[in-house]
Amino acid sequence: MRVRLWSIFLFLGLLLPIAGILRAGQASASQSYVGSSACKTCHADVWLNFYKNAHYKSLASGKEPPEKTGCESCHGPGQAHLEARGGKETIQAFSLLSPPKSMDACLACHADQFSRFQIRRSSHTQASVACSNCHSIHKPATPRHSLARQQRDLCYGCHAGVRAQFTMPFKHRVNEGAMQCTDCHNPHGAASPAWRMGVRPAMTHTSASGEQSCVVCHADKRGPFAFEHPAVRVDGCETCHSPHGSTNPRMLRRPVVFTLCLECHSGAGNFGRRRDGISTQSGSHNMADPRYQNCTTCHVRIHGSNADPLFLR
């Protein structure tokens, strides 16, 4: 009896792998490409306008194999989906994919683009934001980048605090359409910035030389200068300015200029280029006198100077 049982178990152990191979062969045979023309019967609304999409490739060109063109280049082979007469379970439906799987599908084509080389470690990816949360391939609201909504509305959906800052009296003109969030930020992730110990700000464009995105527009602040202001070169523009918007002129963090300067020029601590702190004003500077409360009246080259180490005119 024991010999017969062992014989049965041995037979089943040899038979099951063979059956699995046969099923895999049948599955691979059924998972064949049928072409995008078969999709328009059920998905006519997508098919009629897809020729305007950046992902569209003509099937009549014959330059690409079937698996690299049309709907099946993203959704996979459609044979099983066609035989089952629909159903999300029979095809690669992005609405059912997890954010990492959805990203893997998109990166199959977009991984070679330099602007996305940090996408897997970006703040958006770590917060489980998938490509389809921002992009709409079938019905994009913008012809460029296939965004699901206008870019600022898309960003405001999560960044409500930033939206409030852009309604302040002094701000960058994003709401007016003069610029966009991506002029300063890379939503697909960026390398750690070279200023402020590399911890802030988040996903900001940084040049190869470590310059901030601010100097792309404010080129007169770029330098290099013979006499640099460490607050600008080391700490960054955010030390004095609120980049999105502020209630103060020039988007300053404080309403009075000298109170902003005294945050560093206090004579305290061992910071600074020589680790001896930053000296206080001389006795001739009476900070209670309104004449001395606007430091940039005299120190006009506060972002850097090629003529004077005190940034005088």
Image (spheres, helix red, strand yellow):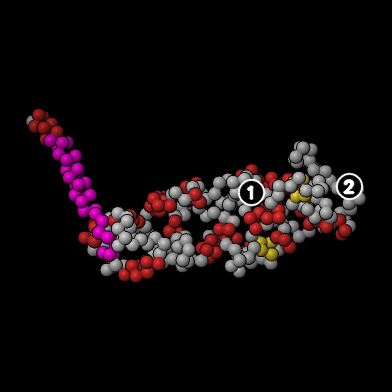
Q: Horizontal and vertical percent for residue 111?
A: 43, 49
Horizontal side of residue 291 vs 70, given as left or right: right
Residue 30 lies in the magenta-colored region: yes
Q: Horizontal and vertical percent for residue 15?
A: 15, 39
> What is the number of callouts on the image?
2
Residue 36 appears in which quarter of the rendering?
Answer: bottom left
First in sequence, mark 1 or 2: give its number.
Answer: 1
From the image, give the main secondary structure of the stretch colored magenta: helix
Mark 1 → mark 2, Cα distance in angstroms: 34 Å
**The disc labelled 1 sits on which kind of residue?**
Glu
Q: Residue at x 88, y 58 (%)?
A: 291
Depth check: 248 or 35 in front?
35
Q: Which mark is residue 252?
A: none
Q: Quadrant of the N terminus?
A: top left
Q: Horizontal and vertical percent for residue 297?
A: 83, 57
The residue positioned farthest toward the right in the image shown:
284
Crowd around label 1: few <14 · some 14–19 · many ≥20 (10 Å): some
Q: Quadrant of the C terminus?
A: bottom right
The residue positioned farthest toward the top in the image shown:
3
Identify the secondary structure beneath mark 2. loop
Q: Is residue 148 visible?
A: no
Identify the secondary structure beneath mark 1. loop
Q: Which residue is mark 2?
A: 282
Residue 253 appears in which quarter of the rendering?
Answer: bottom right
CB atoms of marks 1 and 2 within 8 Å? no
Q: Which residue is mark 1?
A: 211
Residue 221 lies in the magenta-colored region: no
Q: Magenta residues, as a range?
A: 11-39
Q: Horizontal and vertical percent for residue 174?
A: 60, 65
195 up-or-down from 217: above or below:
above
